Amino acid sequence: MSLLAAAATAIAAGLLVVALTTGRRRDRSERPLRPTLPGLDVSRAQFWATVLGAATLTYLVIYAVTGLAVVSLVPATVVATMPMAYFTRKRSQRLARVQEAWPDGLRDLLSSVRSGASLPSAIESLASFGPGPLREAFQGFDAYSRSLGVGPALEMVKDDIADPTADRIIEVLILAYERGGTVVPEILKDLAEATTRDLWTLEQVRTEVLEQKINSRVVFVLPWIVLVAMTAQSGPFREFYSSATGLLVVAIGGAMSLVGVLITSRLGTQPAEPRVFGGTRS
Protein backbone atom coordinates (compact mmCIF):
# COMPACT_ATOMS: atom_id res chain seq x y z
CA MET A 1 0.00 0.00 0.00
CA SER A 2 2.78 2.41 0.81
CA LEU A 3 4.31 1.76 -2.61
CA LEU A 4 1.00 2.53 -4.33
CA ALA A 5 0.65 5.68 -2.26
CA ALA A 6 4.14 6.74 -3.29
CA ALA A 7 3.35 6.19 -6.96
CA ALA A 8 0.09 8.14 -6.68
CA THR A 9 1.87 11.02 -4.95
CA ALA A 10 4.58 11.11 -7.64
CA ILE A 11 1.97 11.17 -10.41
CA ALA A 12 0.16 14.01 -8.65
CA ALA A 13 3.42 15.94 -8.41
CA GLY A 14 4.06 15.40 -12.10
CA LEU A 15 0.57 16.62 -13.02
CA LEU A 16 1.08 19.73 -10.89
CA VAL A 17 4.39 20.49 -12.64
CA VAL A 18 2.80 20.05 -16.07
CA ALA A 19 -0.06 22.39 -15.15
CA LEU A 20 2.32 25.06 -13.84
CA THR A 21 4.84 24.87 -16.70
CA THR A 22 2.30 24.78 -19.53
CA GLY A 23 0.39 27.66 -17.94
CA ARG A 24 3.56 29.75 -17.74
CA ARG A 25 4.37 28.87 -21.33
CA ARG A 26 1.01 30.24 -22.51
CA ASP A 27 1.47 33.47 -20.58
CA ARG A 28 4.82 34.15 -22.24
CA SER A 29 4.16 33.18 -25.83
CA GLU A 30 0.38 33.84 -26.15
CA ARG A 31 0.18 30.55 -28.02
CA PRO A 32 -1.39 27.33 -26.71
CA LEU A 33 0.71 24.22 -26.45
CA ARG A 34 0.59 22.61 -29.90
CA PRO A 35 -0.05 18.90 -30.49
CA THR A 36 3.57 18.79 -31.59
CA LEU A 37 6.01 21.07 -29.79
CA PRO A 38 7.53 23.66 -32.18
CA GLY A 39 10.82 22.48 -33.60
CA LEU A 40 10.54 19.01 -32.02
CA ASP A 41 8.85 15.76 -33.01
CA VAL A 42 7.23 15.37 -29.59
CA SER A 43 3.48 15.15 -29.10
CA ARG A 44 1.56 16.39 -26.09
CA ALA A 45 0.93 12.79 -24.97
CA GLN A 46 4.62 11.93 -25.21
CA PHE A 47 5.52 15.00 -23.18
CA TRP A 48 3.05 14.14 -20.40
CA ALA A 49 4.21 10.53 -20.35
CA THR A 50 7.82 11.67 -19.99
CA VAL A 51 7.01 14.05 -17.11
CA LEU A 52 4.91 11.54 -15.18
CA GLY A 53 7.32 8.68 -15.83
CA ALA A 54 10.33 10.68 -14.65
CA ALA A 55 8.53 11.84 -11.49
CA THR A 56 7.21 8.39 -10.63
CA LEU A 57 10.50 6.61 -11.22
CA THR A 58 12.45 9.12 -9.15
CA TYR A 59 9.94 8.98 -6.31
CA LEU A 60 9.93 5.17 -6.18
CA VAL A 61 13.73 4.88 -6.30
CA ILE A 62 14.32 7.38 -3.50
CA TYR A 63 11.42 6.00 -1.47
CA ALA A 64 12.91 2.51 -1.77
CA VAL A 65 16.26 3.82 -0.52
CA THR A 66 15.06 6.08 2.31
CA GLY A 67 11.58 4.83 3.15
CA LEU A 68 10.52 8.47 3.69
CA ALA A 69 7.68 9.84 1.57
CA VAL A 70 8.36 13.54 2.17
CA VAL A 71 12.10 13.22 1.46
CA SER A 72 11.22 11.51 -1.84
CA LEU A 73 8.66 14.12 -2.93
CA VAL A 74 10.96 17.10 -3.50
CA PRO A 75 13.50 15.29 -5.75
CA ALA A 76 10.59 13.77 -7.72
CA THR A 77 9.06 17.20 -8.23
CA VAL A 78 12.38 18.65 -9.36
CA VAL A 79 12.94 15.77 -11.80
CA ALA A 80 9.41 16.29 -13.17
CA THR A 81 10.44 19.78 -14.33
CA MET A 82 13.37 18.44 -16.34
CA PRO A 83 11.45 17.28 -19.45
CA MET A 84 10.10 20.78 -20.03
CA ALA A 85 13.60 22.20 -19.53
CA TYR A 86 15.00 19.57 -21.91
CA PHE A 87 12.47 20.22 -24.68
CA THR A 88 12.82 23.97 -24.27
CA ARG A 89 16.58 23.63 -24.55
CA LYS A 90 16.28 21.46 -27.66
CA ARG A 91 14.11 24.09 -29.34
CA SER A 92 16.53 26.84 -28.27
CA GLN A 93 19.42 24.86 -29.72
CA ARG A 94 17.56 24.43 -33.01
CA LEU A 95 16.83 28.16 -33.22
CA ALA A 96 20.43 28.95 -32.26
CA ARG A 97 21.68 26.80 -35.15
CA VAL A 98 19.38 28.65 -37.54
CA GLN A 99 20.54 32.01 -36.16
CA GLU A 100 24.21 31.07 -36.49
CA ALA A 101 23.66 29.96 -40.09
CA TRP A 102 22.12 33.24 -41.24
CA PRO A 103 25.35 35.17 -41.95
CA ASP A 104 26.67 32.41 -44.23
CA GLY A 105 23.22 31.99 -45.78
CA LEU A 106 22.94 35.69 -46.52
CA ARG A 107 26.40 35.70 -48.08
CA ASP A 108 25.31 32.78 -50.28
CA LEU A 109 22.27 34.81 -51.35
CA LEU A 110 24.51 37.81 -52.06
CA SER A 111 26.86 35.71 -54.20
CA SER A 112 23.96 34.25 -56.18
CA VAL A 113 22.39 37.66 -56.79
CA ARG A 114 25.71 39.19 -57.84
CA SER A 115 26.21 36.33 -60.28
CA GLY A 116 22.96 37.26 -62.02
CA ALA A 117 20.33 35.13 -60.30
CA SER A 118 17.03 36.61 -59.20
CA LEU A 119 16.28 36.76 -55.48
CA PRO A 120 13.65 33.97 -55.64
CA SER A 121 16.09 31.73 -57.51
CA ALA A 122 18.80 32.54 -54.96
CA ILE A 123 16.46 31.58 -52.11
CA GLU A 124 15.56 28.30 -53.85
CA SER A 125 19.29 27.62 -54.19
CA LEU A 126 19.72 28.39 -50.49
CA ALA A 127 17.03 25.81 -49.70
CA SER A 128 18.96 23.19 -51.68
CA PHE A 129 22.63 24.04 -51.17
CA GLY A 130 22.82 26.49 -48.27
CA PRO A 131 23.86 25.83 -44.65
CA GLY A 132 22.15 22.78 -43.15
CA PRO A 133 19.86 24.58 -40.65
CA LEU A 134 18.61 26.96 -43.36
CA ARG A 135 18.04 24.12 -45.82
CA GLU A 136 15.70 22.57 -43.27
CA ALA A 137 13.99 25.90 -42.53
CA PHE A 138 13.44 26.73 -46.23
CA GLN A 139 12.61 23.23 -47.43
CA GLY A 140 9.00 24.20 -48.20
CA PHE A 141 9.79 27.51 -49.91
CA ASP A 142 9.78 26.13 -53.45
CA ALA A 143 6.31 24.60 -53.11
CA TYR A 144 4.96 27.65 -51.29
CA SER A 145 6.27 30.10 -53.88
CA ARG A 146 4.86 28.15 -56.84
CA SER A 147 1.38 28.02 -55.36
CA LEU A 148 1.19 31.29 -53.39
CA GLY A 149 3.92 33.60 -54.65
CA VAL A 150 7.28 34.64 -53.25
CA GLY A 151 6.04 37.07 -50.59
CA PRO A 152 3.47 34.72 -48.98
CA ALA A 153 5.98 31.86 -49.23
CA LEU A 154 8.52 33.85 -47.23
CA GLU A 155 5.79 34.71 -44.70
CA MET A 156 5.04 31.00 -44.25
CA VAL A 157 8.73 30.21 -43.75
CA LYS A 158 8.90 33.01 -41.18
CA ASP A 159 5.96 31.54 -39.27
CA ASP A 160 7.51 28.05 -39.39
CA ILE A 161 10.80 29.28 -37.88
CA ALA A 162 9.05 31.53 -35.32
CA ASP A 163 12.18 33.42 -34.29
CA PRO A 164 12.67 37.22 -33.96
CA THR A 165 16.00 37.14 -35.85
CA ALA A 166 14.43 35.24 -38.74
CA ASP A 167 11.46 37.63 -38.66
CA ARG A 168 13.68 40.65 -39.24
CA ILE A 169 15.75 38.99 -41.95
CA ILE A 170 12.78 37.63 -43.88
CA GLU A 171 10.99 40.99 -43.69
CA VAL A 172 14.06 42.57 -45.28
CA LEU A 173 14.12 39.82 -47.94
CA ILE A 174 10.46 40.54 -48.73
CA LEU A 175 11.28 44.25 -49.01
CA ALA A 176 14.26 43.50 -51.25
CA TYR A 177 12.08 41.31 -53.48
CA GLU A 178 9.39 43.99 -53.75
CA ARG A 179 11.87 46.73 -54.63
CA GLY A 180 14.14 44.64 -56.82
CA GLY A 181 16.76 46.19 -59.07
CA THR A 182 20.32 47.10 -58.18
CA VAL A 183 19.48 47.81 -54.54
CA VAL A 184 19.15 44.09 -53.68
CA PRO A 185 22.90 43.29 -53.38
CA GLU A 186 23.46 46.31 -51.14
CA ILE A 187 20.52 45.32 -48.92
CA LEU A 188 21.83 41.77 -48.58
CA LYS A 189 25.35 42.98 -47.78
CA ASP A 190 24.14 45.33 -45.02
CA LEU A 191 21.84 42.63 -43.66
CA ALA A 192 24.66 40.07 -43.45
CA GLU A 193 26.92 42.51 -41.58
CA ALA A 194 24.18 43.56 -39.13
CA THR A 195 23.20 39.94 -38.43
CA THR A 196 26.81 38.98 -37.73
CA ARG A 197 27.16 41.80 -35.19
CA ASP A 198 23.89 40.84 -33.47
CA LEU A 199 24.88 37.17 -33.16
CA TRP A 200 28.31 38.06 -31.76
CA THR A 201 26.66 40.17 -29.04
CA LEU A 202 24.12 37.43 -28.27
CA GLU A 203 26.87 34.83 -27.89
CA GLN A 204 28.71 37.04 -25.40
CA VAL A 205 25.55 37.35 -23.28
CA ARG A 206 24.94 33.58 -23.34
CA THR A 207 28.50 32.83 -22.26
CA GLU A 208 28.33 35.17 -19.27
CA VAL A 209 24.97 33.78 -18.09
CA LEU A 210 25.86 30.07 -18.40
CA GLU A 211 28.26 29.91 -15.44
CA GLN A 212 25.77 31.59 -13.12
CA LYS A 213 23.05 29.11 -14.09
CA ILE A 214 25.31 26.14 -13.38
CA ASN A 215 26.30 27.48 -9.96
CA SER A 216 22.69 28.14 -8.96
CA ARG A 217 21.58 24.61 -9.89
CA VAL A 218 24.41 23.01 -7.89
CA VAL A 219 23.54 25.03 -4.78
CA PHE A 220 20.00 23.66 -4.72
CA VAL A 221 20.81 20.05 -5.63
CA LEU A 222 23.62 19.34 -3.15
CA PRO A 223 21.59 19.58 0.12
CA TRP A 224 19.08 17.02 -1.13
CA ILE A 225 21.82 14.63 -2.22
CA VAL A 226 23.28 14.87 1.28
CA LEU A 227 19.84 14.32 2.84
CA VAL A 228 19.21 11.19 0.76
CA ALA A 229 22.65 9.85 1.70
CA MET A 230 22.05 10.47 5.43
CA THR A 231 18.66 8.74 5.44
CA ALA A 232 19.63 5.81 3.20
CA GLN A 233 20.44 3.63 6.24
CA SER A 234 18.71 3.08 9.55
CA GLY A 235 19.94 5.33 12.34
CA PRO A 236 19.28 8.60 14.12
CA PHE A 237 18.98 10.63 10.90
CA ARG A 238 16.25 8.39 9.46
CA GLU A 239 14.48 8.33 12.82
CA PHE A 240 14.53 12.12 13.07
CA TYR A 241 13.25 12.70 9.53
CA SER A 242 10.53 10.08 10.15
CA SER A 243 9.22 12.11 13.07
CA ALA A 244 6.77 14.98 12.84
CA THR A 245 9.54 17.51 13.50
CA GLY A 246 11.73 16.01 10.78
CA LEU A 247 8.88 16.01 8.27
CA LEU A 248 8.24 19.68 9.07
CA VAL A 249 11.93 20.48 8.51
CA VAL A 250 11.89 18.69 5.14
CA ALA A 251 8.64 20.39 4.11
CA ILE A 252 9.98 23.84 4.96
CA GLY A 253 13.33 23.11 3.30
CA GLY A 254 11.60 21.78 0.18
CA ALA A 255 9.37 24.83 -0.07
CA MET A 256 12.34 27.16 0.36
CA SER A 257 14.33 25.25 -2.26
CA LEU A 258 11.53 25.35 -4.81
CA VAL A 259 10.95 29.05 -4.22
CA GLY A 260 14.69 29.65 -4.55
CA VAL A 261 14.82 27.70 -7.81
CA LEU A 262 11.94 29.74 -9.22
CA ILE A 263 13.56 33.02 -8.17
CA THR A 264 16.99 32.18 -9.59
CA SER A 265 15.44 30.82 -12.77
CA ARG A 266 13.50 34.03 -13.24
CA LEU A 267 16.53 36.21 -12.49
CA GLY A 268 18.81 34.14 -14.73
CA THR A 269 16.43 33.97 -17.67
CA GLN A 270 17.22 36.27 -20.56
CA PRO A 271 14.17 38.31 -21.57
CA ALA A 272 12.62 36.76 -24.66
CA GLU A 273 12.85 39.09 -27.63
CA PRO A 274 9.33 39.87 -28.84
CA ARG A 275 8.40 38.89 -32.38
CA VAL A 276 7.66 42.38 -33.67
CA PHE A 277 7.30 41.05 -37.24
CA GLY A 278 5.72 37.79 -36.16
CA GLY A 279 2.27 38.41 -37.61
CA THR A 280 1.38 37.67 -41.21
CA ARG A 281 1.07 40.74 -43.38
CA SER A 282 -2.43 41.82 -44.26
Image (cartoon, rainbow, N blue to C red):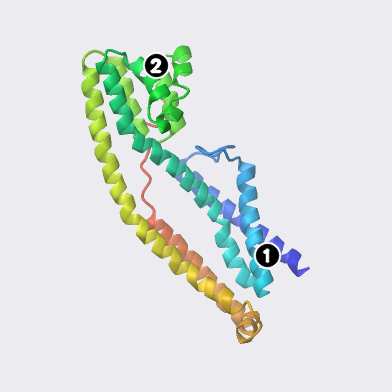
Q: Earlier in the sequence, mark 2 or mark 1?
A: 1
Instruction: Examine the image and state in which quarter residue 43 appears.
Output: top right
Give the quadrant of the C terminus.
top left
Cβ atoms under marks 2 and 1 closer than 8 Å: no
Up-down: is 182 above or below 51? above
Instruction: Examine the image and state in which quarter residue 14 appears.
Output: bottom right
Q: Please, what secondary structure does the residue beneath circle 1 have?
A: helix
**Which residue is label 2 attached to?**
150
Residue type at the position of mark 2: Val
Residue 213 image position (x, y, % from top left): 39, 59
Please tell me which residue is depicted at 54% across the width and 55% down the height of the picture. Answer: 82
Residue 87 image position (x, y, % from top left): 52, 46
- Crowding around mark 1 (Cα neighbors within 10 Å: few <14, some 14 to 19, many 20+) is many
- Residue occupying the far front of the picture: 129
Please tell me which residue is depicted at 62% across the width and 87% down the height of the picture. Answer: 236
Please tell me which residue is depicted at 27% across the width and 35% down the height of the picture. Answer: 195
Q: Please, what secondary structure does the residue beneath circle 2 have?
A: helix
**Which residue is label 1 attached to?**
60
Badge count: 2
Q: Nearer the viewer, residue 60 or 30?
A: 60
Residue 119 image position (x, y, % from top left): 32, 17
Q: Nearer the viewer, residue 25 or 42?
A: 42
- Residue occupying the far bottom of the picture: 236
- Crowding around mark 2 (Cα neighbors within 10 Å: few <14, some 14 to 19, many 20+) is many
Up-down: is 196 above or below 173? below
Question: Can the viewer see residue 135?
Answer: yes
Question: Can the viewer see residue 276?
Answer: no
Up-down: is 20 above or below 150? below
Q: Nearer the viewer, residue 109 or 51?
A: 109
Residue type at the position of mark 1: Leu
Residue 253 image position (x, y, % from top left): 52, 73
**101 relative position to 34: left or right:** left
